[in-house]
Image: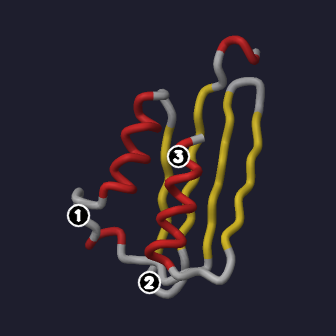
Protein backbone atom coordinates (compact mmCIF):
# COMPACT_ATOMS: atom_id res chain seq x y z
CA UNK A 1 0.00 0.00 0.00
CA UNK A 2 1.54 3.28 -1.13
CA UNK A 3 0.00 5.19 1.78
CA UNK A 4 1.75 3.01 4.35
CA UNK A 5 5.06 3.25 2.50
CA UNK A 6 4.82 7.04 2.39
CA UNK A 7 3.92 7.22 6.09
CA UNK A 8 6.94 5.09 7.02
CA UNK A 9 9.20 7.12 4.73
CA UNK A 10 8.00 10.42 6.23
CA UNK A 11 8.52 9.13 9.77
CA UNK A 12 12.07 8.01 9.04
CA UNK A 13 13.01 11.08 7.00
CA UNK A 14 11.50 13.79 9.20
CA UNK A 15 10.65 12.34 12.61
CA UNK A 16 13.87 10.66 13.72
CA UNK A 17 11.89 8.02 15.66
CA UNK A 18 13.40 5.21 17.68
CA UNK A 19 10.27 3.12 17.02
CA UNK A 20 7.59 2.93 14.35
CA UNK A 21 4.63 0.61 14.67
CA UNK A 22 1.85 -0.39 12.31
CA UNK A 23 -1.51 -1.98 13.01
CA UNK A 24 -3.74 -3.38 10.32
CA UNK A 25 -7.35 -4.29 10.98
CA UNK A 26 -10.40 -4.92 8.88
CA UNK A 27 -14.13 -5.40 9.02
CA UNK A 28 -16.41 -6.59 6.23
CA UNK A 29 -16.81 -2.92 5.25
CA UNK A 30 -13.37 -1.38 5.74
CA UNK A 31 -9.63 -1.77 6.00
CA UNK A 32 -7.78 0.31 8.60
CA UNK A 33 -4.07 0.92 8.98
CA UNK A 34 -2.55 2.94 11.79
CA UNK A 35 1.10 3.95 11.76
CA UNK A 36 2.61 5.54 14.87
CA UNK A 37 6.06 6.74 15.75
CA UNK A 38 7.79 8.18 18.79
CA UNK A 39 9.71 10.79 16.82
CA UNK A 40 9.91 14.57 16.84
CA UNK A 41 6.34 15.14 15.76
CA UNK A 42 5.23 18.53 14.48
CA UNK A 43 2.64 21.23 14.90
CA UNK A 44 -0.22 20.42 12.50
CA UNK A 45 -1.23 24.08 12.25
CA UNK A 46 2.21 25.08 10.97
CA UNK A 47 2.39 22.49 8.19
CA UNK A 48 1.86 24.07 4.81
CA UNK A 49 0.29 22.41 1.81
CA UNK A 50 3.78 22.18 0.31
CA UNK A 51 4.58 19.02 2.26
CA UNK A 52 4.29 16.60 -0.63
CA UNK A 53 4.41 13.39 1.46
CA UNK A 54 1.34 14.31 3.49
CA UNK A 55 -0.33 15.82 0.45
CA UNK A 56 0.25 12.57 -1.48
CA UNK A 57 -1.22 10.50 1.34
CA UNK A 58 -4.32 12.73 1.47
CA UNK A 59 -4.78 12.53 -2.32
CA UNK A 60 -4.44 8.73 -2.42
CA UNK A 61 -6.86 8.24 0.47
CA UNK A 62 -9.40 10.59 -1.12
CA UNK A 63 -9.15 8.80 -4.49
CA UNK A 64 -9.91 5.52 -2.75
CA UNK A 65 -12.92 6.98 -0.91
CA UNK A 66 -11.29 6.69 2.49
CA UNK A 67 -10.65 8.86 5.49
CA UNK A 68 -7.43 10.09 7.05
CA UNK A 69 -6.76 11.03 10.66
CA UNK A 70 -3.44 12.67 11.47
CA UNK A 71 -2.34 13.41 15.03
CA UNK A 72 1.04 14.91 15.83
CA UNK A 73 2.55 17.08 18.50
CA UNK A 74 6.09 18.40 18.79
CA UNK A 75 8.29 15.96 20.72
CA UNK A 76 5.36 13.52 21.09
CA UNK A 77 5.44 11.61 17.80
CA UNK A 78 2.92 11.19 15.03
CA UNK A 79 0.00 8.88 14.33
CA UNK A 80 -1.56 8.41 10.92
CA UNK A 81 -4.76 6.41 10.68
CA UNK A 82 -6.25 5.55 7.29
CA UNK A 83 -9.60 3.85 6.83
CA UNK A 84 -10.52 2.59 3.36
CA UNK A 85 -13.66 0.89 2.08
CA UNK A 86 -12.97 -2.73 1.19
CA UNK A 87 -13.22 -3.58 -2.49
CA UNK A 88 -16.37 -5.45 -3.50
CA UNK A 89 -14.38 -8.58 -4.38
CA UNK A 90 -13.41 -9.02 -0.71
CA UNK A 91 -16.93 -8.76 0.68
x, y percent for residue 45: 29, 69
Q: Are marks 2 and 1 in contact (CB under 8 Å)?
A: no
Image quadrant occupied by the N terminus: top right
Q: Which residue is mark 1?
A: 48
Up/down of 83 relative to 17, above or below:
above
Q: Which residue is mark 2?
A: 74
What residue is shown at x 47% (from left), y 72% (from top)? 13
x, y percent for residue 87: 64, 19
Give neighbour class at mark 3: few <14, some 14-19, many 20+ (Cα, 10 Å).
some
- Give how far apart the Cα atoms at labels 2 and 1 are: 16 Å
Up/down of 85 relative to 16, above or below:
above
Name the side, left or right, on which 17 lies relative to 75.
right
Q: Which residue is mark 3?
A: 3
Q: Which mark is residue 77?
A: none
Give neighbour class at mark 2: few <14, some 14-19, many 20+ (Cα, 10 Å).
few
- Give how far apart the Cα atoms at labels 3 and 2 are: 22 Å
Q: Give the mark, 3 or 1, whose residue is nearer the N terminus.
A: 3
Give neighbour class at mark 1: few <14, some 14-19, many 20+ (Cα, 10 Å).
few
Name the side, left or right, on which 50 lies relative to 19.
left
Amino acid sequence: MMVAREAFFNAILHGEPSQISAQLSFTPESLRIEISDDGKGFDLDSVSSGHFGLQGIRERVNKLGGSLELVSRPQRGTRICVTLPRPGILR
